[in-house]
Each structure stands twice: as structure tokens, then as C-alpha cells.
Image (cartoon, coloured by chain):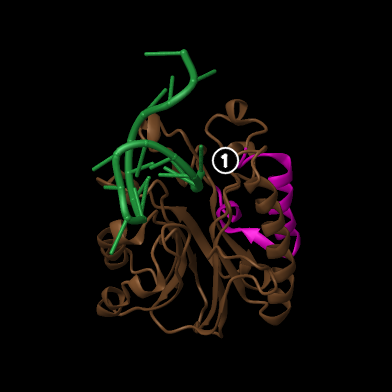
Amino acid sequence: MKFATWNVNSLKVRLPQVLDWLKATEVDVLCLQELKLADEHFPLQAFVDLGYEASWAGQKTYNGVAIVSRLPGTDVQRNIPGFEDPQRRIIAATLPAPDGPVRVISAYCPNGQSLDSDKYPYKLSWFAALRDWLEQELRAHPRLLVLGDYNVAPHDEDVHDPEKWAGQVLVSEPERRAFNELLGLGLSDAFRLFEQEPKQFSWWDYRQLGFRRNAGMRIDHVLVSDALKSACVSCVIDKEPRRLPQPSDHAPVVAQFDFGA
DNA sequence: ATGGCCCACATCGTGGGA
């Protein structure tokens, strides 16, 4: 069973690519970020026509997240409970799997803009709220996957030019600590469960021929709870959609699980 | 050479992304 995450940077623009990609990859669950569209404009029928269901939390112009899945989700939760926030960055749903339900969260973590921006303390407080909520979610749902755009490159090996980026947003120590606190709850970065080639990234700047130079960062992650860790058999970044005309600046990340049954 | 691109918006300039 395949679970994926993809920041599409406007679902309206990227919908044909997303549909083609679902057909080609046969992913079972796709977490989307940066829909950039209001709830009433979510293209549900296009997914239904391909045999998928969907739950979404949309927002005009900015943010917006969804979970597209072959089977419908239950206990759908939008936003972090108790964290007052007009920005739509979280949706959670419980999905059936061969050996029992899996709780899936699609997360679009704040960017932070820069260390001296007021968006930076918002990012850190958002991560603190996420951590506290995930602690509860893990207790209620030990079989948990948190997929999304974390806007944090966890280590220098996840950055094309660590010296140039040192101390900046996406790599700063407080952000990396916030990311590590999530791992401390009993979650693992699925990508690092496996041997990987160096210089593998999930986002490349549109400017400066970022993709062609592989000047990127690994900021999109699949976090897997201890209970699901042994079922995870691979985690790869699919760069193919990034090569297409009019691409998202992010590539999808796909984690495969062998649930037996 | 300190910015280059892309997306959205009751667009033609600005904010946001990362």
C-alpha cells in the first residue's frame, strides 16, 4: 500500500498532473498541500472519476490541504484542535488498511519567511501545537502517519549548499529542534529508514534553474509511528513530475508499506 | 551584479512562497 505527499502549489493549475500521476503510480493515499482554493472549488468529481474519495480543508489563495484515498476516511479532523488559526494547514482522517486502520495526517507547516519575520515565531508556536496534538493522536492512534511539507530540512545533508543556508529559515536550530521534537514522540523520518543516494531533495527553487542544478532542499517528509515502522518497505522521492512543463516546485514523496494480510 | 520564478488577486502591482 502506497502513501504519498505532494505540495502542488495550486491544485487548480496542477490537477491534470496530479490525475496523471495517480493513474501512473497507483498510489492509494495522497496527501496534498497548498491547494490554494476554497472548499467549494475542490475538484472532487475528477478524483471520484479515477476511483478515489477525498477529504479537504480549503482556503482561498493560500494554504489548503487534502487527503485523497481509494477508500473514504472517517473521524476527519481539520486544523489542530485548540490552536486558533484561520490558516488551513492540517487535515486528519482514519483510513482502512489490510491489517487495521491507519490514522493519516496531511500537514502544511508554516514557512516562516525569515528569522526576523513575525511569521517565524508563528511557525515555532505552530510546531509546538502540532507536537502537543500529535502526542495525543499517537495515544489514540498508535498506527499513525504524518505526511506533508514541513518546511524544515532536518540535517545539512538535506540542503544543497549548507554553508550558504546556515542559520537561515528552513534550517535554523529552533526549527530543527521543533522537527526533532516530533521524532521524539515516537515518529521516524521514513526516508532515512533506508539507504539513500546523497543530494536527494523534494523542493527546488523556480529561480536560477534550481532543478537543473539540483539546488534543492529535502523539506517534504513522511513520518511513521513506531507501530508502523517495520511495515515500511521503501520511501522515495519521485522527481518525474518536477521535470514536466509548468511543474510544482515540490516533488511527491512516496512511502510503501507491506501490511501483510 | 544580493535578483532572477511562479501563483493568486474583482490583476497590470503586490504579497507569499522557500
From the top left corner, tell me how far across and down residue A182 is, in percent. 70, 59
Residue A38 in picture, x, y percent from top left: 40, 68
Relative to the observer, which residue lies in front, A209 or B6?
B6
Q: Is residue A14 above or below residue A228?
A: above
Total numbered labels placed on residues in the image: 1
Q: Tell me the colour chain B is drawn in.
A: green
Tell me residue A119's x, y (percent): 63, 48
Drawn side of residue A13 relative to residue A165, left or right: left
Q: Residue at x 39, y 33 (%)?
A: A207
Question: Which image quarter is the N terminus of chain A in?
Answer: bottom left
What amino acid is found at the position of numbered circle 1 in the picture?
A: Asp
Give whichever of A171, B8 is nearer the camera.
B8
For disc 1, the chain is A
Q: Which residue is mark 1?
A: A158
Element marked by disc 1: helix
Task: Out of A8 and A243, give the one closest to the viewer.
Answer: A8
Q: Is residue A217 above or below residue A19?
A: above
> How many residues crowd mark 1 within 10 Å: few (<14), some (14–19), many (20+)?
many
The magenta stretch spans which residues? A169-195
Identity of the residue drawn at 30% across and 74% down? A47
Q: Is residue A215 left or right of residue A179?
A: left
Q: Position of residue A167 (x, y in %)?
A: 67, 33
Residue at the spot 74% in from the left edge and 70% down from the top edge: A135
Q: Quadrant of residue A16?
A: bottom left
Q: Is residue A173 magenta?
A: yes
- Which shade of the palette goes to chain A? brown
- Magenta highlight on residue A108: no
